[in-house]
Amino acid sequence: MLKGTAHQFLLEQLWAEYPDARCVWTHRDPVETYGSMLELTAMVQEATAGPIDRPALAEGLLAGMRAGLDGALSSPFLDDPRLAHVRFNDLVADPVTELERLFKAWSLDWTSQHSGCARTWLDDSANRGDRHGRFTWSLESFDVTAEEIDRLFADYRMRFLGDGSGA
């Protein structure tokens, strides 16, 4: 099992090595994804180099993210049956149902025992996603708006989130 943010960009290489692998690409609101990534990147750079030009960082990172996404979206593997596309909000809202759906789509066994184990794990407060606090960020210091990010990633939003702006 791999958990990462770059596997969707390397599907050809991944499946060349592991042809039986099944992959899940979770799709999240680009404003949330990239807003958080901008803040995290800025924090790391500021911790090592001091104050940075946050608007310039945003411009470069968003352009790079757009280019990388264009590559992923043009992959002939994008609609491969080994790749499942899942909306992040659906996964968070009902992870057990999403897992069951994926297993069935891939003709893998899913039992009530799987559901029970997953629900037990999810119900354990030690596994809560916010058990260490919440990461906060704001687009203001980057001189970029949610509307600009929505426009930049409108094709992605439409294809994988079912809309063209704001989620």
Image (cartoon, rainbow, N blue to C red):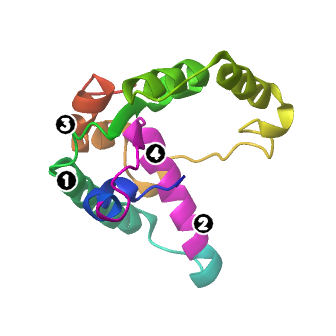
- Is residue 110 inside the magenta stretch? no
**Residue found at the very far bottom of the displayed protein:** 49
Q: Residue at x 17, y 52 (%)?
A: 75
Q: Position of residue 134 (x, y in %)?
A: 71, 42
**Quadrant of the frame with the C terminus:** top left
Q: Amino acid at mark 3?
A: Asp
Of marks 3 and 4, which one's residue comes earlier in the chain? Answer: 4
Magenta highlight range: 16-45
Q: Position of residue 140 (x, y in %)?
A: 48, 48
Residue 33's tag is 4
Residue 155's tag is 3
Q: How many angstroms separate mark 2 from mark 4 (CA)?
A: 16 Å
Q: Is residue 144 above or below residue 48?
A: above
Q: Position of residue 152 (x, y in %)?
A: 23, 44
Give the quarter of the image for residue 46.
bottom right
Q: How many angstroms separate mark 1 from mark 4 (CA)?
A: 16 Å
Q: Are marks 3 and 4 in contact (CB under 8 Å)?
A: no
Residue beneath disc 1 = 70
